[in-house]
Amino acid sequence: MSGVAARPVPRRLDVASVVELVRGLREGRLDPGQVLAEHVARIAAADELNAFLWAEPERLLAEARRADVAGRPLAGLPVAVKDNIDTAGIPTTSGSPVDGGRVPATDALAWRRLRDERGATLLGKTHMSEFAYRSHHPALGWVRNPRRLDRATGGSSSGSAAAVSAGLAPAALGSDTGGSVRIPAAYCGVVGIKGTFGLVENDGLVPLSTTMDHIGVLARSVADAAIVFEQLPATALRLVDPESLAVREAEPRELRVGLERRYFLAGAQPPVVRAWARSVARLEEAGCRVSEIRLAAARRWRAAHKVILRHEAWEYHAARIHAGAPYGPVFRESMEAGAAITVREYERALGVRRAALDELDEVFRSVDVIVTPTCPTVAPAVEEGRRALAYTRYTTMAAFAGVPAASIPAGTGHLGLPIGVQLIAAKSAEATLFGAAALLERLIGPDRDRAA
């Protein structure tokens, strides 16, 4: 890559947080139309990132002006939406020419709730790995990492992570089936969070794996992510204080932290291990109770995750693949591998998952969160999409088991590229996850952009 391609995109100093925007919009100090217009202008000025597949300023602004958002919790907050989440009357293509002309008639339930009930406004549809798996379609190009343009953003919520990292969007929706919110968050130096499977309904999410897909949020801080995430379920969660808009931190002396070294450090680059160890040390110094845990079957869980995902994805895509639809080579190859998975193998993998849930239930009796690196490496070169499966090593477990998980920035490694630390909590323990994430974010704040 040329020196120009390797340079970072300058980050604006005047980019407002979700906390600042929501407070200003609620108090009437900010105009929703002006806030949206400023963000749309930033998108147009950063086309080299290839972060958006659809963003039409005139239409977005016209719809925002017509919306009555007064008094709603996210009134006028611009949110970018991953392009596999249906938006009525607006293209939803899942990053593929196969669905290039698809314009859904209805919104995904989660997005309709965020916009119609909570008052958010659409900022645009973000680019992604083809049908949320492994690689971008060659015809649509790669999303570039704002930290360094010759580096990938990870998948599959690549455009959402790049948009948030570059200040084009204060927050974005993504989907996570094996790490697709958390991996791009780690690679781009932002926060990425998914909840318990089923907490946020998947109606209107183009499926990859119907039993493991999760809709999640990417933002620049834990509080920013929490403000949006708490509004996604049918019954809003209470993750932030309604006045201060802060997340209540976990009490360190009450937080039990689990460490699993055999699986979750294997294959990690030395700076990744150091950033994780530094984060664990901060928690221990603050008074958290840290203990070792063992997940002896983790490798088996990862293999079962792959079987389930490919079998379920093949069921969705088989007819069009047989008909010769123009899928990209990486996605087609993966789906054809899924065609060879038998029903017996699929059912066996489901059995492995049931056993995993029982084992994790037992683990979470003794710890509140498990802390791991998010990815074994920093962001790879853009062209290395074919190796993307290797980067999901530490993230698949939470999607496989359907438990909540988050990635937060925890330092930098090779070429100053971001490193993420992952927190995993028990099923339905979103409050615990966000509280622990807020605590860790504060404790490692000075290390966020510091070399590990």
Image (tube, rainbow, N blue to C red):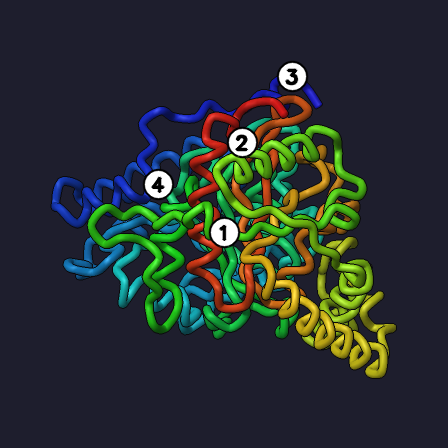
Q: Which residue is mark 3?
A: 3
- Secondary element under disc 1, as helix, strand or loop, is loop
Q: Which mark is residue 146?
A: 2
Type of amino acid at the residue the image marks with label 2: Pro
Q: The C terminus lies in which quarter of the figure?
A: top right
Q: Which residue is mark 4?
A: 40
User: In the image, what residue occupies the spot 52% across and 27% down?
Assistant: 447
Type of amino acid at the residue the image marks with label 1: Leu
The Cα–Cα distance between marks 4 and 2, rounded to whole angstroms, is 17 Å
Q: Nearer the viewer, mark 2 or mark 1?
A: 1
User: In the image, what residue occupies the spot 75% across and 38% down?
Assistant: 268
Judged left or right of residue 167, residue 65 is left
Q: Nearer the viewer, mark 4 or mark 1?
A: 1
Q: Position of residue 324 (x, y in %)?
A: 76, 67
Residue 428, relative to residue 181: is it above or below?
Answer: below
Quarter assignment of residue 15: top left
Residue 399 shows in the view: yes
Q: The N terminus lies in which quarter of the figure?
A: top right
Judged left or right of residue 382, residue 418 is left
Residue 125 shows in the view: no
Type of amino acid at the residue the image marks with label 4: Val
Q: Nearer the viewer, residue 92 or 325?
A: 92
Q: Earlier in the sequence, mark 1 or mark 3?
A: 3
Judged left or right of residue 302, residue 76 is left
Q: Position of residue 262 (x, y in %)?
A: 79, 48
The Cα–Cα distance between marks 3 and 4, rounded to whole angstroms, is 28 Å
Q: Earlier in the sequence, mark 4 or mark 1?
A: 4
User: Dot 4: within a 10 Å radius of its alpha carbon, few (fewer than 14), some, or many (20 or more) residues?
Assistant: many
User: Dot 2: within a 10 Å radius of its alpha carbon, few (fewer than 14), some, or many (20 or more) residues?
Assistant: many
Q: Nearer the viewer, residue 33 or 156?
A: 156
